[in-house]
Structures are given as structure tokens and as C-alpha cells.
Amino acid sequence: MMSGAPTKQPRLDSYFSPPATSSLSAARQKTCTKKLASFICKDMRTISIVDGTGFKEFCQELEPRYRIPSRGTITNRIEDMYNSTSDNIRELLKDQYVALTTDGWTSLATASYVTATAHWISGDWEMHDYVLKTKYLMESHTAEHVQEVLKPFKVTTEALSTEKYPTASAVLPLKQVLLSQLNTPTADKPEPPALSEMKTKIITDLEKRYSEERAHLCC
């Protein structure tokens, strides 16, 4: 007969669970980090969540071997996701008839933003919506700021609305009118930076899309 305390029998699940001292494979670590970055984006959480005590305890309970990445690593992963998502959306928008909408809104911290969204209907009649950009505005997104930029396009739209196949002789003069009005600064007060930036981008796009050489080649 053996003396002393009885030997404790190991639990059955201990034979299947990996020891906590081992580390995840590189592939598994990468997959978990990618899912963590996706969680932060989809649920709109702050990147600082990786520093939270409760979050660390939660991850420790789920998978003790997972090494929670730093803020810098998560930031890099989110930037990679943004770039790949942007490329995918560009491919989706090719050869599509797209409607664009803009929305000015104010955060709880009273900061002004403007968001541009693309909408289109796919071949199987499903509606698709993708946010293209959300930009911080240094000044309020009042109607006059946007109206100031869009005003010259009203006349142009009315002039071309009756033309089914506009020719270069119709497009190029209107383009010059638009460029002239967009390049004319406001006399009464300085332009807000966001308004100047918007005008610059529209001018650049007009020059690129409706150059005289390209217009003559297409018409």
C-alpha cells in the first residue's frame, strides 16, 4: 500500500489543449490580427481598444497564445485594408452607371464632415452603396459653400440636357465657361480652404476629361 496524498488524475481535455506557453503559428497570428482589424473597422471601435485591460483579459481567455498587436501594427493593417478595399471598389465601379451623393454632417464633438457615396444598380437589380470618402471640413458645411461651387454647372447641365450626343463644338465652349467661373475668386471675402480645394479638384477633372485633343478624337 502506498502512503501519502493520492495523485490527482489529469483532465481529459488537457491532452488536447495546447500548452499556454506555446505560441501560435505565424499564419494563425496573422489571421487573428486581420480579424481584429476588421472588428475595429466594422464596429467603429477605437484603435486604443488593444490597450484595454478588459479586452486583454477577454483575448487571454479565448486564446492565451495570441499576442495582441500594438496600436501601430493595427494601424498598418487598417491602412492595408483601406487600400485593398479602395482597389476593389474601383474595379466594381468600372462600366457602371453611378449616382453620387454628398452629405454634410456634424459629429458629437461638433466637427464638420462631408461624405461622398456612390450608388448603382447591378445587373440582378440589387442596389449597391459605397462610401467613397469622408473628409473633415475646417469650416461649417453650410449650403452656400457647396452652392458656390455647383452654381456654374446649372447652366451647363441645362444646355447639354437636350443633346443626346454632345459634340466637341458644344462641350468645349461650356468647359471654358466653367473653368472661367471656377477660377474667378470671390471679391467680398476670402474663400474657405475646403471651397478652394473643391474647385481645384473639379478644374483638374475637367481638364483631364474634356481636353480638346480627347474631345476631337471622340467626336
Image (cartoon, helix red, strand yellow):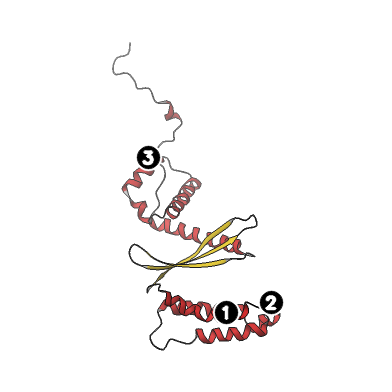
How many neighbours does mark 1 have within 10 angstroms: few (below 14), some (14-19), or many (20 or more)? some
| Residue 61 placement (x, y as % from top left) | 37, 39
Q: Is residue 84 visible?
A: no
Which quadrant: the N terminus? top left
Badge nearest the viewer, 2 or 1: 2
Q: Left or right of 108: which side holds 149? A: right
Q: How far is the residue under mark 3 from the one under mark 2? A: 65 Å
Residue under label 1, please give it: 206
Q: Left or right of 58: which side holds 120? A: right
Residue depicted at 50% across the width and 86% down the height:
183
In the image, residue 118 above or below residue 48: below
In the orientation shown, which residue stands out farthest toward the bottom? Answer: 187
Front one among 216 and 73: 216
Badge nearest the viewer, 3 or 1: 1
Which quadrant: the C terminus? bottom right
Tell me, for residue 61, which label it has, or none: 3
**Which amino acid lies under the numbered mark 1 shown in the image of this protein?**
Leu
Residue depicted at 43% across the width and 86% down the height:
186
In the image, residue 62 above or below residue 216: above
Q: Left or right of 130: which side holds 145? A: left
Q: Earlier in the sequence, mark 3 or mark 2?
A: 3
Tell me, for residue 165, which label it has, or none: 2
Badge nearest the viewer, 3 or 2: 2
**Which amino acid lies under the numbered mark 2 shown in the image of this protein?**
Tyr
Q: How far is the residue under mark 2 from the one under mark 1? A: 18 Å
Q: Earlier in the sequence, mark 2 or mark 1?
A: 2
How many neighbours does mark 3 have within 10 angstroms: few (below 14), some (14-19), or many (20 or more)? few
